[in-house]
Image (cartoon, grey):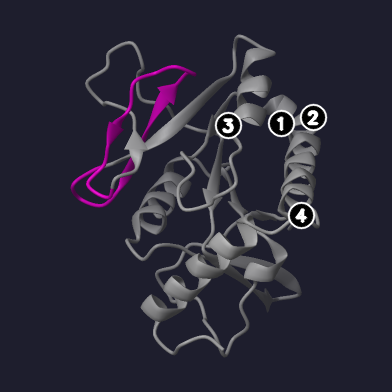
Amino acid sequence: MHGNSPKTLRQELLLQRKEFAAKHNYREKQDCLIGHLNDFLATRGQALRSIAAYWPIQNEVDLRPTLLAWANSDSSRQISLPYARPDKHLDFYQWAEGDILIPSQHGVPEPNPDNTSRPQAMPDCILIPCVGWSSSMLNGKTHYWRLGYGGGYFDRTLAQLRKDQPQLICIGVGFDWQKLNDDQWAAQTHDEPLDLLLTETGLLG
């Protein structure tokens, strides 16, 4: 049973994720999720040139090897990582394996914005890890929502990026068990919807 506050809910979900990652069948479910990402990259990913990834923390799924393979197969492709600005928005900077990263104020490795060899990027697609997620129906269409760590960085960033780049694809990353019902959590008016949701079941959307 989850607590009533979003903070308590996040804490419980993060503990469950830690326990889930230690289970014997975790590798199988993770491989299924990554397999569905590979399917996406082999189809819709052919038209993409810049994908924003994330540096995995607290038992998030590590998608870096898969994305590096995608990027290394075509010199016109690039991967970027988020940099948290003081105003709680995100910028994205190009990233390559072996780059030296700097810790954010939350301890998350992120690119150095002063590194002139890794310029700022404008991603076509952003992969966003979920602490939890939910879905809702509106006008016959399913919408997916992300419960994150509570800082609001992605919501502020997506709201701005979508104005500048309407074709942007935002994909939440999580597992089926992380789905929340309306009694546990409901998206707020400031929450930005996900375009797609990637789980071990498939790419939902």
Q: Which residue is mark 3?
A: 64
CA–CA distance in space, label 4 to label 2: 17 Å
Q: Position of residue 80 (x, y in %)?
A: 46, 29
* In this rendering, the label closer to the viewer, 3 or 1: 3
- From the viewer's perspective, is 196 left or right of 185? right
Residue type at numbered disc 1? Gly
Residue extent of the magenta highlight: 85-106
Give the residue at x 67% y 21%.
69
Does the magenta-highlighted stretch encompass residue 43?
Answer: no
Q: Which residue is mark 2?
A: 42
Give the residue at x 43% y 41%.
164
* N-term mark: 2 or 3: 2
User: Splitting the image into 4 quarters, where does residue 85 fall?
Assistant: top left
Q: Which residue is mark 4?
A: 200
Q: Report the disc number at residue 45.
A: 1
CA–CA distance in space, label 4 to label 3: 17 Å
